[in-house]
Image (tube, rainbow, N blue to C red):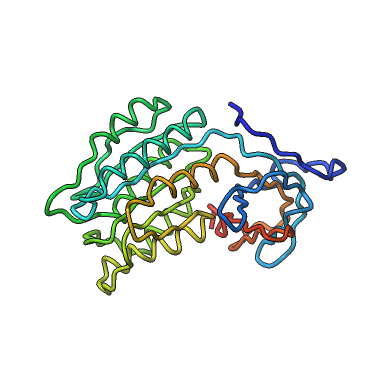
Amino acid sequence: MLFAFALSIPGGSQAPQRPSDRTRDIYVSAIDATGAPVTGLGVEDFKVREDGVAREVLKVAPATAPMQVMLLVDDSQAAGLAVHDLRLALTAFVDQIKGHGEIGLVTIGERPTSVVASTPDVTAVKNGINRIFARPGSGAYFTEGVREVIRGVQKRKAERPVIVAITFEGVEFSNLPYPRVLQDLYASGATLHALEVGAPTSSVDDEMRNRNTVIADGTDNTGGRRDQVLSHIALPERMAQLADELLHQYVVTYGRSDALIPPEKIQVTTTRPGVTVRARKRTADR
């Protein structure tokens, strides 16, 4: 399966790859000031550090591995007025991603519920999207939903797992502590992207603190995208931007050290002016 785009990769005299146990691949998003993907980057455009130590970038290529995308959708009462735009955004996203892996759908209003199991069948996913309604009188179970999705990712041994969460500023009922959820998220190797709809809540209760911390730290440390929009009208545009970003990621291969203990922190930066990169900052084995 190949993506329908090509990236010119400068630096044809790059060093040969080392044995697989001496290299690491990392998925990287590169975007410009408008949020659009930047193509044509090569070896000389990236720098990688592990625990502050520079590593040699060996290869840069388009990310062509199939994705396993799990849509985690808040269908609690807070989603009431947004259902139409929510369905439009999700359907368009699925149409953009189709052919590039599997997609599943989990809702988190009232309780985490698997609507569509991970599948390459976009018709099944879109049928599930059309069954989304706001649940009257319900709150969200975001952190429990994240945990359930992570368990599925680990069970399938997904190669390129992606979690896309859409939340609304309402009531959160999950009581899972954020350190446990984040630890499982990092260990799964999944990237968390979050699109939050509504003005940020001023609630300081434990449930909202756990949710907000999982979103903030989870997106940042896994290389994900985090968007906050005031109105659900912006959902289709932002989901289209995310799909475009996912379809134009890079795989950056770099040399590893001989240390037996895996690094705790990874830092990927770019030397290209005006370009922002996002990549995992925590390894799956730490």
Residue sitting at 33 percent across and 31 percent down? 126
Q: Nearer the viewer, residue 8 or 164?
A: 8
Residue sitting at 39 percent across and 54 percent down? 195
Residue lying farthest to the right in this orientation: 13
Residue lying farthest to the front in this orientation: 233
> Which corner quadrant of the image does residue 56 belong to?
bottom right
Q: Position of residue 12 (x, y in %)?
A: 85, 41
Residue sitting at 70 percent across and 46 percent down? 253
**Left or right placement of residue 175 versus residue 19 in this view:** left
Q: Nearer the viewer, residue 237 or 159?
A: 237
Q: Is residue 3 above or below residue 75?
A: above
Total marks shown come to: 0
Q: Is residue 144 above or below residue 249?
A: below
Q: Nearer the viewer, residue 273 or 204?
A: 273
**Left or right placement of residue 16 versus residue 233 in this view:** right
Residue sitting at 27 percent across and 74 percent down? 204
Q: Is residue 126 above or below residue 173?
A: above
**Left or right placement of residue 224 versus residue 250 in this view:** left
> Which corner quadrant of the image does residue 104 belong to?
top left
Q: Nearer the viewer, residue 86 or 124?
A: 86
Q: Look at the image and tell me in which quarter the N terminus lies.
A: top right
Residue lying farthest to the left in this orientation: 137
Q: Position of residue 123 (x, y in %)?
A: 35, 25
Q: Position of residue 225 (x, y in %)?
A: 49, 55
> Which corner quadrant of the image does residue 132 belong to?
top left
